[in-house]
């Protein structure tokens, strides 16, 4: 292998004396026989977001080599070498989420770390097509769960889990299985080379070879990155499967107008905002939406970024795993998956990560979600996991079709289905060529329209300290009349946020901090004191407010009773609103159709609002004012005059809302929060 000159710029990591501060050295053409026993081949965007240019018509990839060892947990992840900047490559299986207390089915997928001793850029000798024996073997493979069983699982999850209030969406997976005869690294290289040539839109295209596993794939989805103290996540959801002739503008417009597809994206955006609000604390910003055009299908995506001081291993732990491959709320989604999937997920929906140093010694992290990935054992046993996001109006047959579409690219790379049918989206603007369908003005307009009804708090300019620009807006008396950009709460009351097992609380805390209030977060299951607390914010959570045999629900009822009997004002959201309503004597019923990830127009104390709902239960009331002699309070009720469904409650000492004021689906969330907290904590109380 001939060595070439190093080039400046990009990530640290070349094997040279002292700290590596440039792009890994280009080392020429690599022959398969030169590969070590354990290695990683990786094609990914550089720091500028652009893939490296080809050399002599061949794609340039990174070669990482070094010793691989199994780790007991993320606490054991080594740091990049402080002397020469040598990076660390990680394979994080799905079961690692048990470190966060998530429920996972056990399997033998190991948490692996490579201390990278050699980090080079190379081009690959074309290994030729996948051999016919491999293609024949893969063609005879099948899903471990057949279509009828998978569709029945989708029906049960929709009716029992989503309908029962357990969550908004759940990603249910199955695995395509086959046996490759005489499996070798040469066969893996042929698949990898095909993906390099024919798959488009991948974030990482990779081949990982260890003694116990080979992973090869082309994943579209970044997990989380860290560069210059800024963390970034990239929620992707919604799937447009190309017709036989490739993508069309009409097809994209129809896809972007599909309510199910947009609901999926908004729900995973909310869920990843929860993670980023916890990882970053302040200054989180959302950009998008965008289209991700791949070889066989397209997705919609957003990009979320914000400043953080956390090291890479803690960022990885705090973001296990992406809701796009698990569901929401996250804790309960793991439970639902464990109830309905037949076994462990292996590396599917886990993470591959590269941790390194920048030129100034700062932490860098690049990571990708392990989807569209083939996992191959030394004996040739092939497994390709694929899942579909189940929501309240899922069609079981369509969800099964989606899992097939998601494995098609990898199966095509293995020679299944004849010659590759990948459709490379036209860049447009070339003489003699048609414009790319994604550049059609109707497509661009449909994308822009996605944001017009969303919460501008998350879409506005990032503020590193969470503060607001401009003067403090006066409180005008109406709910949400305070400016979305300028709203604050006079007096900066100290707010305790109680987490009822849905990390929407991190987003609530982000909103409240931006209003100028100091915030603390505690689990509702913990003992806490109200000393020094001016207001309590009771967060949302999964489950039924009537399930008093659930210790978490029983505890939430007890906390509400304590707050009602005390003097500290409080605001309750979603599940906590239902518990408060129950304590006030209002009947609670399960909705005939769950409102999970739904934006609705309601009249909130006489003012029209667009709000985001994640609920399967509602309180009902037949009057506009409740009186409670025991509590000595009068409670104003905002409700649907036709159905009696309660949208919100307010009194001098407490308020509550059924919707999620922190969600991207609540258009004026910050203004509503400012008004409710000012009413509760204002100096004229």
Image (spheres, rainbow, N blue to C red):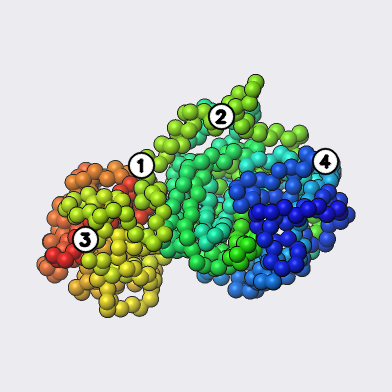
Q: Which is more toward the observer, 215 or 679?
A: 679
Q: Which is more toward the observer, 399 or 64?
A: 64
* Real-space CA distance between mark 3 and mark 2, rounded to the nearest whole angstrom: 49 Å
Q: In this view, does 42 lie to the left or right of 544?
A: right
Which residue occupies 55% across, 47% down?
388
* Real-space CA distance between mark 2 and mark 4, rounded to the nearest whole angstrom: 31 Å
Marks 1 and 2: in contact by CB < 8 Å? no
Quadrant that contains the C terminus: bottom left
* Percent coordinates x, y for residue 326 in the rendering: 53, 56
Q: Mark 3 points at which residue?
A: 678
- Count every numbered label the image shows and give the total: 4
* Percent coordinates x, y for residue 81 in the rendering: 68, 70
Q: In this view, does 42 lie above or below 68?
A: above
Mark earlier in primary sequence (3, 2): 2
Marks 3 and 4: in contact by CB < 8 Å? no
How packed mark 2 is, by other alpha carbons closer than 10 Å (few <14, some 14-19, many 20 or more), is many
Q: Residue 129 carries which label?
A: 4
Q: In this view, does 200 lie to the left or right of 518?
A: right
Mark earlier in primary sequence (2, 4): 4
Q: Mark 1 points at which residue?
A: 453
SS assignment at label 4: loop
SS assignment at label 1: loop
Mark earlier in primary sequence (4, 3): 4
Q: Which is more toward the observer, 670 or 654?
A: 670
Q: Is residue 464 above or below residue 31?
A: below
Q: Name the residue under label 2.
A: 437
């Amino acid at each position: 292998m001939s060595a070439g000159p190093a080039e400046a710029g990009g990530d640290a990591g070349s094997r040279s004396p002292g700290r590596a501060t440039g792009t890994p050295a280009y080392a020429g053409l690599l022959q398969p026989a030169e590969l070590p026993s354990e290695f990683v081949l990786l094609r990914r965007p550089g720091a500028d977001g652009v893939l490296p240019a080809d050399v002599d018509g061949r794609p340039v990839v990174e070669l990482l080599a070094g010793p691989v060892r199994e780790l007991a947990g993320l606490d054991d992840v080594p740091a990049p070498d402080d002397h020469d900047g040598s990076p660390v490559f990680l394979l994080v299986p799905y079961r690692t989420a048990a470190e966060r207390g998530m429920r996972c089915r056990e399997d033998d997928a190991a948490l692996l770390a490579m201390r990278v001793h050699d980090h080079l850029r190379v081009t690959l000798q074309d290994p030729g097509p996948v051999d016919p024996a491999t293609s024949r073997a893969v063609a005879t493979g099948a899903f471990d769960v057949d279509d009828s069983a998978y569709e029945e699982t989708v029906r049960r999850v929709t009716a029992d889990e989503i309908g029962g209030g357990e969550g908004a969406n759940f990603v249910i997976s199955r695995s395509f299985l086959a046996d490759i005869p005489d499996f070798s690294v040469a066969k893996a290289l042929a698949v990898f080379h095909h993906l390099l040539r024919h798959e488009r839109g991948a974030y990482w295209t990779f081949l990982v070879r260890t003694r116990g596993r080979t992973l090869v794939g082309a994943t579209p989805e970044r997990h989380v990155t860290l560069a210059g103290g800024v963390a970034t996540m990239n929620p992707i959801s919604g799937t447009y499967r190309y017709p036989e002739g490739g993508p069309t503008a009409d097809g994209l417009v129809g896809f972007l107008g599909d309510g199910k597809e947009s609901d999926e994206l908004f729900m995973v955006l909310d869920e990843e905002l929860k993670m980023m609000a916890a990882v970053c604390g302040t200054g989180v910003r959302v950009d998008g939406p965008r289209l991700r055009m791949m070889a066989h299908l397209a997705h919609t995506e957003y990009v979320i970024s914000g400043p953080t001081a956390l090291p890479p291993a803690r960022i990885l732990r705090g973001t296990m795993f992406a809701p796009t491959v698990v569901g929401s709320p996250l804790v309960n989604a793991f439970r639902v998956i464990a109830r309905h999937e037949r076994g462990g997920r292996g590396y599917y929906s886990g993470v591959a990560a590269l941790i390194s140093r920048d030129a100034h010694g700062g932490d860098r992290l690049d990571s990708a979600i392990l989807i569209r990935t083939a996992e191959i054992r030394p004996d040739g046993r092939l497994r390709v996991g694929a899942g579909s996001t189940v929501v309240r109006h899922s069609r079981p047959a369509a969800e099964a079709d989606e899992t097939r579409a998601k494995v098609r690219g990898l199966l095509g790379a293995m020679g299944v289905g004849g010659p590759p049918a990948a459709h490379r989206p036209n860049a447009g603007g070339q003489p003699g060529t048609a414009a790319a369908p994604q550049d059609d003005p109707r497509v661009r307009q449909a994308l822009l329209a996605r944001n017009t009804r969303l919460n501008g708090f998350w879409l506005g300019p990032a503020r590193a300290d969470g503060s607001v620009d401009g003067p403090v807006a006066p409180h005008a008396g109406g709910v949400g009349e305070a400016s979305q950009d300028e709203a604050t709460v006079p007096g900066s009351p100290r707010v305790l946020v109680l987490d009822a097992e849905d990390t929407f609380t991190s987003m609530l805390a982000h909103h409240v901090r931006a209003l100028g209030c100091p915030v603390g977060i505690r689990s509702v299951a913990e003992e806490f004191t109200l000393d020094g607390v001016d207001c309590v914010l009771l967060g949302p959570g999964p489950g039924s407010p009537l399930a008093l045999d659930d210790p978490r629900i029983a505890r939430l009822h007890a906390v509400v009773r304590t707050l009602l009997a005390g003097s500290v004002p409080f605001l309750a959201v979603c599940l906590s609103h239902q518990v408060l309503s129950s304590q006030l004597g209002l009947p609670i019923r399960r909705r005939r159709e769950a409102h999970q990830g739904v934006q609705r127009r309601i009249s909130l104390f006489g003012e029209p609002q667009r709000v985001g709902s994640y609920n399967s239960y509602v309180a009902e009331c037949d009057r506009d004012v409740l009186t409670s002699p025991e509590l000595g309070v009068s409670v104003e009720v905002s409700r649907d005059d036709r159905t009696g469904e309660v949208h919100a409650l307010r009194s001098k000492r407490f308020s509550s809302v059924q919707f999620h004021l922190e969600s991207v689906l609540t258009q004026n969330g910050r203004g509503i929060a400012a008004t409710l907290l000012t009413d509760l904590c204002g100096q004229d109380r």
